[in-house]
Amino acid sequence: MLWMKWLIVVFVLLILLSLGSALVALVRERDEKDARRMLMALSWRIGLSLLLFLLLLLSFKMGWMVPHAISST
């Protein structure tokens, strides 16, 4: 299903955005606020990654996505 592929792309982009936000907070880190911002960004990244993993498992189980083998010919 095409909508599932787009949803995966959106999740990956959100994960990368969160990781970039944490990097900016790490480089800036002037005070406690930047450290808290980095912690929240990394927490969001972990949550989004887990949600994406569960979404992939559910989509395979429900038949929305079908894994296929790569042929060697």
Image (cartoon, grey):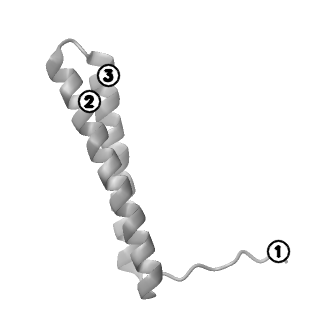
Lower position in the chain sequence, tag 3 or tag 1? 3
User: Of discs 3 and 1, which sits in the foreground?
Assistant: 3
Q: Residue at x 58, y 79 (%)?
A: 67
Farthest residue in the left direction?
33
First in sequence: mark 1 vs mark 2: 2
Q: Amino acid at mark 2?
A: Met
Question: From what the image shows, is residue 73 above or below residue 18?
Answer: below
Residue 24 appears at what percent x and percent y?
30, 26
Check contact, mark 3 vs mark 2: CB within 8 A: yes
Judge from the rendering whether residue 66 lies leftward or rightward of residue 32; answer left or right.
right
Residue count near mark 2 (Cα–Cα under 10 Å), binned few <14, some 14–19, many ≥20: many
Q: Secondary structure at mark 1?
A: loop
Q: In the image, residue 38 lies at what x, y percent? A: 26, 30
Q: Residue furthest bottom?
A: 63
Mark 2, secondary structure of its residue? helix
Relative to the observer, which residue lies in front, 3 or 55?
55
Tell me if 30 is positioned left or right of 51 in this view: left
The residue that disc 2 covers is: 38
Which quadrant is home to the N terminus?
bottom left
Disc 1 or disc 2, which is closer to the eye?
A: 2
What amino acid type should be assigned to the residue bearing mark 1?
Answer: Ser
Amino acid found under the numbered disc labelled 3:
Leu
What residue does disc 1 label?
72
User: Can you see residue 64?
Assistant: no
Side (left or right) of 50 relative to 66:
left
| Residue at 19% from the left image edge and 27% from the top image edge | 36
